[in-house]
Image: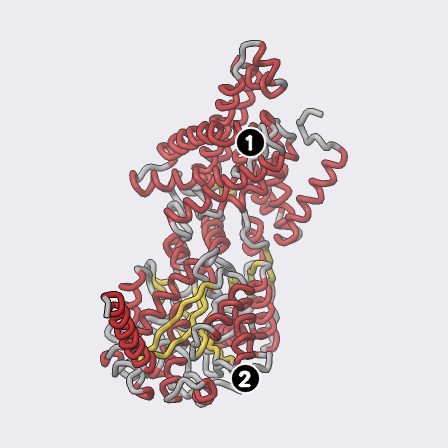
Amino acid sequence: MSFVLVQVIVGGLLLGAVYALFSSGLTLVWGMMNIVNFAHGDFVMLGMYVAYVVYTLMGGGPILGAPLATLVLATLGVVVYFALIRDIMKGPMLAQILGTFGLALLLRYSVFWWFGANFLSMPQDIVGGTYAFAGLRIEASRLLAGVVALLVTFGLHLLLTRTSLGSKMLAVAEDATAAQLMGIRPDTMQAIAWAIAAGATGLAGALIANFFYIVPTVGETLAIVAFVTVSLGGFGSVPGALVAGLLIGVIESLSGYLIGAVYKDIVVYVLFLFFLWFRPQGLMGKM
Amino acid sequence: MTLKHVTGLLCAAAMSLALAAGARAEDKVVKIGVIMPMSGGTASIGAHAKAAIEVAMDIINNAHPELGNLPLAKNAGLAGLGGARIEAVFADNQGNPATGQNQALRLITEEKVAAVFGAYQSGITLTSSAIAEKYGIPYLNSESVAANLTERGFKWFFRTTPIATDFAKIYVDFLSDLRAQGIKTDAIALVHDNTEYGASVANTISTAFKEKGQPIAVDVAYPVNATDVQGQVLQLKDKKPDVIIMISYTSDAILFAKTMQSLDYKPPVLLADDAGYSDPSFIKAVGKISQGVFNRSSWAVGPSGSPSAIIADMYKKKSGEEMDDTVGRQMQGFFVLADAIDRAGSTEPAKIQAALKATDLKPEQLMMGYKGVKFDDKGQNVLASGLIIQLQDGENYVAVWPKASAEKAPMLPYKGW
């Protein structure tokens, strides 16, 4: 019994790391620009399709697919910033919501049109099967995603707190006009932020594709978790997203196993609301 | 007479000729309104259905003596109406009950169809058939399984497909057959999502087993479109049921298959209730790690050269997809409707209704594995039945039960990967 619990907790931690991985891009954009990117889930979906195309056309695994997905999505991030975000940022909140939501639908139905509505899947052993360790079973593909989640979180945190690029980006986030007076170009910084955020999201998609199904509407399923993770972790806090992702993963797994799967979302959201009641800025967010 | 007059006269003459020709062609065409989801989330279902109906029309309207006993195949057109051709008028329900209702109204009042056929989703069949009932036009449904559709006291509604209660009976009989062969089937687990489909089918199945004195041992409900099912698989691994019955849509079915493999869990018997497990993309995605899963179906391709195998070939040529249970039930329903119109010898609604009521098709006259087609007072086909198929040797389901229609023996226990 207790042994199964260990498996449940380990599974929850790995799941939580994946939640953290695909939330980091969202928290960056949210924290830096106060923009809620409703197309975030569909960025994850695009990353999955890039990985799938790499696999079917070139026979490449995650070693080729993950960097390529990062690159493709980072480019898309810059394009989206200059073509859409820069303009709607000046508009009212509603324009931002509808703008990114429209982008989500455009991306989703373009993929629908090109790939069709069928479910796709990568081969089970694309990363290297499952490790059995003292009776514990850990999927290599989930482990890889978990490790990369930690690395990405750590890397983004270092970038924001220890580099001059990071300081400039934070300066723009704080006060774009003041930053401009200091010789920082807000446009460039925000385009870079979008490239990093979308790139990290593409990377997440490519790694999730190794163990999840791929379908044009998969972004819908994943996006809700990302929004909850980001608000629990604190808007704009990358380490917060990691801690929140791990927490949600473990709570979901434990309540799904102990109480029943249909109740696990209730448990997660009750705890979530209760927590925000005491700490509305989230785990690691600033007031 | 100026040139203008001449042209005018010529035009009038041409038009009257065209009208006359049209009228003659009209006499020989029987229009059937077909309501299907051609856009929206289930658009792929509508596209498949359209291809299937077109194949059915080809079989009815042209001579296909190779199809043996299948009614209407031998000669071209409907013999009962002097060789008239069947023409389907397709209408898009957009996955929306209100749109389906409007389409039924349009088909009946403007297109003047002789009968309506549709509409895939139970909820849309519900609304569109109410219009047909009001106008006194026969409505044939071939694939909606919600039990209440035939409980409304309708006089013009007929349904050929087996429904949830039929499936439950099939599972009870199949498992008791396995038990007779010495396979343990005592503890049954039901795994289902929380949608109308998942919840109502699970309820029907558990009632059927309870009536046989075998209550369901484990009930695992999960939210539809789950992001993770590790907890549920570990629960099952803990409780070790002898049989698992899965009631899941495609996304969750794929996730369960992947998770079962990564956690190394195989139940001795895995039985699926159609839906996700019949989706061709399920088999492509995880067929290789779901070897030996049982599924229910009324469709079996049969030996090569048999009518069902020929029809499957025709369908594949038309659509590029393998024939599956859903399109099979749709084609069968369309044949039943066309056969009734043929026997009615008229497009008069009351005569078609009477012919539908008198329908008595034998198994050898069908392409599906029903025991026949015969409607009760509520319009439900009382001879609708299904068989158990199993995913064996790669990517194909083969019929394994009942013995009379089995191509191969059931392979046990569940192999997985």
Q: Quadrant of residue B117?
A: bottom left
Q: Given the image, on which type of amino acid does mark 1 rest?
A: Ile
Identity of the residue drawn at 72% across and 37% down = A275
Helix, strand or loop at mark 2: loop
Q: Position of residue A3 (x, y in %)?
A: 59, 45
Identity of the residue drawn at 31% across and 70% down = B55
Q: Position of residue B49 (x, y in %)?
A: 39, 66
Question: Is label 2 on the same chain as label 1?
Answer: no
Quote the CA–CA distance across marks 2 and 1. 57 Å
Q: Chain of mark 1?
A: A
10 Å neighbourhood of mark 2: few (<14), some, or many (≥20)? some
Q: Which part of the image, by quadrant, shows the C terminus of chain B?
A: bottom left
User: Residue at label 2?
Assistant: B155
User: Residue at label 1?
Assistant: A88
Q: Position of residue B132 (x, y in %)?
A: 52, 77
Q: Position of residue B411 (x, y in %)?
A: 38, 66
Q: Which part of the image, by quadrant, shows the N terminus of chain B?
A: bottom left
Q: Is residue B117 above or below residue A105?
A: below
